[in-house]
Amino acid sequence: MAEDDPIDEPEEEGLADDAPGDSEPEEEFARPLDPEERESVEADLEDLEAMKSVFEPQGAKGVVIACTECGSNHFYGWELLKESLEHMLETGEPRMHEPPYEPREDDYVVWDYGKGYVDALADAGLEGAEPVDLSTCAWCDGTLEPHFAFCPQCGRQVAVIRLYRELLGRGIEDKEARTLLFRAGFEPFT
């Protein structure tokens, strides 16, 4: 900064009126969050990570939050909201952001719904459970990505294979697991 910069020098009485617009401080200093606010923001960060781990593999781009001040929905990508919450922890103030251009509401999870869903998973003991990994289709050996719900080659739903592997992982014998799935109405697979 230059030596004659007024920010570096203490302001003397009456000098602020000499320059137009200098009556307000140029920069507002961040106020630290009180312990209760800090705890709330930290909990929101944890909830955000949990929602991201559940909904991002299903194709969700982030969350939508209904603003009580303006009455509009605000759309946040996963990383954008994480950075904003971390910024709030550091400075005490939320970070401004540009809204996405014409967001598709279906691409975003409503915060309250996502929070309730993640809480229900935790209550059921499924919190933090990794999805059953599939790399190939059990019917046609087509290549699968971890988030695929259907095989791109044969079109069959792959959830039954994930369920089958989960049953085996819980100690149910192969023949019994296949029988249960067949009785439940699923198509046999190899």
Image (tube, rainbow, N blue to C red):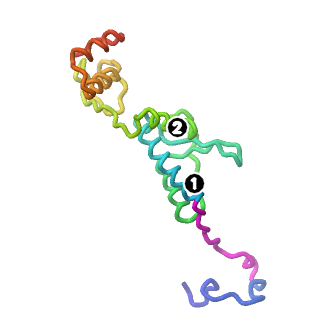
Amino acid bearing label 1: His
- The tag earlier along the polypeptide, 1 or 2, is 1
Residue at image position (69%, 76%) is: 25
Number of marks in picture: 2
Numbered badge on residue 114 = 2
Q: Quadrant of the N terminus?
A: bottom right
Secondary structure at badge 2 equals helix
Q: Main secondary structure of the magenta part?
A: loop
- Foreground residue among 25 and 39: 39
Alpha-carbon span between mark 1 and mark 2: 22 Å
Verify whether residue 188 appears in magenta: no
The percent coordinates of residue 20 (x first, y second) are 76, 79
Determine which quarter of the picture holds residue 27. bottom right
Left or right of 34? Residue 50 is: left
Residue at 57% from the left image edge and 90% from the top image edge: 3
Specify the amino acid type for callout 2.
Gly
Q: Position of residue 51 (x, y in %)?
A: 47, 41
Image: 28 above or below 35: below
Tell which of 46 and 110 is nearer to you: 46
Q: Quadrant of residue 127?
A: top left
In the picture, the disc for residue 46 is none
Mark 2: give few (<14), some (14-19) or many (20+) Cα within 10 Å. Answer: many
Nearest the camera: 166 or 187? 166
Please provide the residue range marked out in magenta: 19-35
Looking at the picture, tell me which residue is in the foreground, 64 or 186. Answer: 186
Residue 5: percent from left, percent from top: 61, 86
Element class at badge 1:
loop
> Which residue is identified by label 1?
97
